[in-house]
Image (cartoon, rainbow, N blue to C red):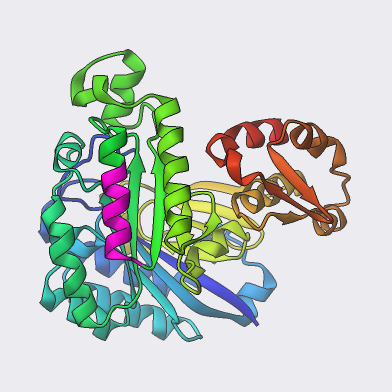
Amino acid sequence: MTSLGIYVQVPFCQTKCTYCNFHTGVVSSSRFAPYVNAVCREINTYRDLYLAAGIELAPAIAENANVDTVYIGGGTPSLLDPTHLQNILDTIRDSFRGELTEVTLEADPETVDAQKASAWMRAGINRVSFGVQSFSDAELAASGRMHRRADIYRAVPILRDAGIANIGFDLIAGLPLQTPESWRESVDRLVELAPEHVSVYILEVDEESHLGSELLKGGQRYSAGAVPSEDQMAESYELAQSLFSAAGYHHYEISNWAKPGFESRHNLKYWRREAYLGFGAGAHSFSGVQRWANAHDAASYVNAILKGVLPVEQRERLTLEAALEEALFLGLRQLDGIDVSRIERDYAVKLASRFDPLVSSGLVEWNGPVVRLTPSRLSVSNEVFVTLLR
């Protein structure tokens, strides 16, 4: 039986972080309930909405899919009242078959309290992904984060006491004011708190964020002059690799580590090109044959759903070549690599000529039918993807 993941987007935050390039907004909490009602309506009526919008589900998804993972992301969905989260999850249970074995909520440390944590557990949330980013108060302040180091230490015991046994931490390599010493401190403190899952992201520089735009202009606002170099970011990533491995974490995807058995089941669906449906403003979906995304503006999204219209902003029916590129790119993000013989069979292609120069340069390893990124070269993995997909 085919498994299906569901993603719910909550595009609201308390503040806009300087490095953030997501379509999120700081709005009055009075807008939360109407938004949640619209999300629940989209979930309840998704078949009719898809039909009217020309969205096609693969037969295995349309007829025989069981939902087993839910990921509520953002934004900062932990800002919502627990009853809102309960309503969303109850609507999913009413609208889909299956048992929700992994239900993840993204949360910021300062938004956690004992009452919320207990309510999350009662709603069925059994995994919390923390946007920690750093254990340095100076870095957090420079990045526009609301929480401080003390909030992390306060929030984790609250979640543990509520019974949440699967906690993930995110760190960002390359924040303004970050030094090799402060990065080592953040990694050491993370290992000390022993979350079940860890994600490390290297700072993205693009014009969609305040900090990225300033860096591209060569300006100094948002502490742009104190951003580490690309080489320093790569060294930070490689240090994290080493220290997480020594602490018993399994490196299973370029940016992700987990204690055995705690890999993100939902996110693995993305990298394995399994189907998932996204609900909410800006949410992306993959039906097995099509990819699409809802309009990013929350108000426009709510108005469209109330009129019975799915506000599709992007839509793509995948060609065989596009599907092949995804299989290579997403497959290689996983440390286990890809089965080249299977891909050659499924897509009727020969891939040796694509991989030979990458093997020669030491960027990938080819063992039997499996090609994987060379573990010591993961910090320059973009070189592999650019070469492979050009």
Residue at the (46%, 62%) spot, across then down: 249
The mark tally for this picture is 0
Q: Name the chief secondary structure element in magenta.
A: helix
Residue range (magenta): 184-195
Residue at the (36%, 18%) spot, across then down: 216
Whether residue 211 is situated above or below residue 35 in the rendered picture: above
Whether residue 98 is situated above or below residue 104 in the rendered picture: below
Q: Position of residue 175 (x, y in %)?
A: 29, 35
Q: Position of residue 324 (x, y in %)?
A: 74, 48
Residue at the (50%, 85%) spot, across then down: 97
Q: Is residue 243 left or right of residue 118?
A: right
Q: Is residue 244 left or right of residue 365?
A: left
Q: Is residue 86 left or right of residue 48?
A: left
Q: Position of residue 81 (x, y in %)?
A: 16, 70
Q: Residue furthest top?
A: 218
Residue at the (13%, 58%) spot, across then down: 151
Q: Position of residue 308 (x, y in %)?
A: 39, 64
Residue 312 in sight: no
